[in-house]
Image (cartoon, grey):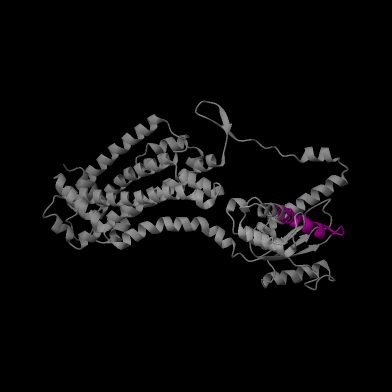
Amino acid sequence: MASKTLLVAQREYLENVRTKTFWIGIFIVPVLIAAAMGVGVLLQKFKEVQRYAVVDLGDDGLAERAEREFRAKDVKAMFALGADLMAAAAAEDADPALKALLSGLEPGAQPSGEQMYAMFQWLQTQPPDQVARYEGIGNSARYEHVSLDELGLSGRTAEEQAKALGKLVADDELFAFFVLGSDPLRALDDFRYVSNNLTDADLREDYEDALTALVRADRIEDAQVDDDTARRIQETVGFKQEKVSASGEAEDVKGEDKVNQWAPVGFVYFLWIAIFSIANLLLTNTVEEKSNRIIEVLLSSVSPSQLMHGKIFGIAFTGMTIIGTWVVFALLAAWLAPALLGDGGGSLGFLIAAISNTSYLTSFVLYFLGGYLLYAAVLVAIGSVCNTLKEAQNLMQPVMTLLMVPLIAMVFITKEPNGTVAKVLSYVPIYTPFTMMNRAAGPPETWEYVSTSALLVVTILLTFKAAGKVFRVGVLMTGNPPKLKEILGWLWRS
């Protein structure tokens, strides 16, 4: 019996892995993930410059001061960049492109505007961690201030200026315009930001930061508060984050620690996709073979039980091949990332560290296997009583509804991995793989792993037994699919 089951499993496995589309499908997933990680940075380079104008209702020159404050980070960053790059160019092992860029510049001399711009362009070719050192340097490239003089609006009333600027915004000639209030020392009710883009708030938020600093300073001066008192009043409360180690001592929280706490969300998402897509492959395969009468030929050589188990295990081997390949790619990415991304690669480096966490990867593989076997037994039973994929999709609706719960709860469980909801869902077998994977950063106690795994194994065995009864009767049925009451009746038969 075992040998025939293995022969069916071998047939199922080879039918999948010997096709080119199977391997293309495997390789395209890590490629898409890698592309998704870099596409955000790439798309930012294609982002259009946002042109804006400013209408100042006051008479204290706030608009001019705001523009200087708004560009201050850029100026400071550019000077810091110039000093750093000049020092780097003086080194013996300096980048030849950088040396050529600064050739002819005397030590201590200020670079020209053209050289500063060339430095900025050179910086964009460097690793992300080096670019991140110069916070604010992007304003010059991202935003362009258009004066009212350039627009021919300087001699008009504020109402006329706002109306004309509104027309320019409507015609997409301006991204936005600001209206600065008449008396910011007293009230800010008449400060306005006008734009038709309601999703990109970067310009508004950056300009608000600059204006907040100016208005706050003006109000402190108007109230005749001394600098030391003003500094103490404005000081914000901040807590240094620490965590408790296994020895019970407090230690600093690092960036990778935070990423590791949230990493299970990603693993749960991929676990859900893997279990559903691969188990669904079994469902599709069963329905197609039944509708093509191939199953009748197979049943002339093997029993329904051998056929069902062989199909489940064959697709399981297929799934493990897919998961194993993904794990290899994840480990390869973790190995290559430091060399490709420089010193840690910033936040991407933390992400790679989470991917290479062997405990997460091991849990992912084991819970995939447990979850697949459970849902595969259910889906192969559904497939056995259906003659078309349309019939199977109708019966799949309750299963899909149940499968949505782990996705809905995964963020909540990540925040409370050892809370009541997480613990309860851990003991619901259809949710055990997802919930325990979700709780991996908690982590749960060892006895919880043992007890939930034991319950899952028992449930898988019972589900296999029930699915076998349905498969044995349903696989040779033709015509309309049986009613739910009839299927339940089969389960009570010996």
- Tell me: residue 488, above or below residue 172: above
Residue 4's spot in the image, x, y percent? 15, 49
Q: Write the residue at 82% across / 37% down.
A: 229
Residue 10's spot in the image, x, y percent? 21, 52
Residues drawn in magenta: 58-80
Give the quadrant of residue 96.
bottom right
Q: Is 74 inside the magenta-drawn segment?
A: yes
Residue extending farthest to the front is 92
- For the N terminus, give its image quadrant: top left
Front in this rendered view, residue 346 or 282: 346
Q: Write the residue at 62% across / 61% down.
A: 97
Q: Write the residue at 19% across / 52% down.
A: 8
| Left or right for 78, reference 306 | right
Residue extending farthest to the left is 300
Q: In the rendered picture of this protein, how many numbered marks are placed on residues?
A: 0
Front in this rendered view, residue 333 or 217: 333
- Tell me: residue 101, above or below residue 377: below
Front in this rendered view, residue 33 or 480: 33
Q: From this viewpoint, is residue 431 visible? A: no
Q: From this viewpoint, is residue 346 visible? A: yes
- For the C terminus, give its image quadrant: top left
Residue 386's spot in the image, x, y percent? 24, 57
- Tell me: residue 413, above or below residue 396: above
| Left or right for 135, reference 414 | right
Residue 475's spot in the image, x, y percent? 19, 54
Magenta segment, principal secondary structure? Answer: helix
Q: Is 170 inside the magenta-drawn segment?
A: no
